[in-house]
Image (tube, rainbow, N blue to C red):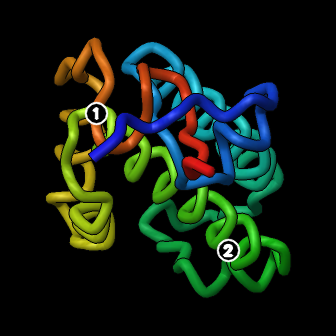
Amino acid sequence: MSQPQAYPGPLGPFWLFFSPIGRVSREPYMLALGFLWAVFAIPVSLWVQTLEIPGDQTAVVSMEDFVNSHPLLPYMLFASHWVVLALAIKRLQDRNLSGFLAVLIFVPVINFFFVIGLGLMPGEPGPNAYGPRPNSRWAKPS
């Protein structure tokens, strides 16, 4: 079996956030997750600031209230899940594991530890079946 060849094109933010193909090392993975969480926190914090809580401090605001007040939230959730899934697949491939294990991000409680754990475990420094080096994507041999 021949070693995968590096893709000749540049790697950019679109590849990092949306493509599940290739490998990504720990630093870009954690920075991308931090950026995603910061971008997602902005509308949530704006919503909390505009929230009108009645005089009763025991009032509970439900997720349904949040979704009804922000109609773009389901799309934001879908996009953020796609980004986390793509990052997890590339991170698993950097560890020379199957990207199929990324389905663990859909399991409550396990997902938090899985996503953080992927950022803490070192990848393989050399070539593997998913790319010639970390932070690369492979090209099919011709």
In the displayed structure, does residue 30 sit left or right of residue 41?
left
Which residue is found at the position 50% from the left and 42% from the top? 22
The image quarter containing residue 91 is top left
Mark seen at residue 90: none
Q: To which residue does mark 1 refer?
A: 128
Residue 50 locus on image (x, y percent) = 82, 53
Above or below, comparing residue 100 to residue 17 in the picture: below
Q: Residue at x 54, y 40 (%)?
A: 138
Question: Disc 1 versus disc 2: distance between alpha carbons?
Answer: 44 Å
For label 2, the residue is 66
Marks 1 and 2, the one that precedes in the sequence: 2
Q: Is residue 72 left or right of residue 33?
A: right
Relative to 21, is 129 above or below?
Answer: above
Label 1 sits on a secondary structure element that is: loop
Against 35, residue 81 (above or below) is below
Amino acid carrying label 1: it is Asn
User: For this rendering, which residue is in front, 7 or 90?
Assistant: 7
Identify which residue is drawn at 22% across, 63% down.
Answer: 101
Could you tell me which residue is drawn at 32 percent across and 59 percent down? 99
Q: Are marks 1 and 2 in contact (CB under 8 Å)?
A: no
In this rendering, the answer to whether 10 lies above or below 91 is: above
Could you tell me the amino acid type at mark 2? Phe
**Front residue (pair 96, 56):** 96
Nearer to us of marks 1 and 2 is 1
Tell me residue 86's x, y (percent).
Answer: 52, 54
Q: Nearer the viewer, residue 90 or 84?
A: 90
Q: Position of residue 114 (x, y in %)?
A: 20, 47
Q: Residues within 10 Å of mark 1 (few under 14, many from 20)?
A: some
* Label 2 neighbour load within 10 Å: few <14, some 14-19, many 20+: some
Residue 73 % position (x, y): 74, 71
Q: Secondary structure at mark 2?
A: helix
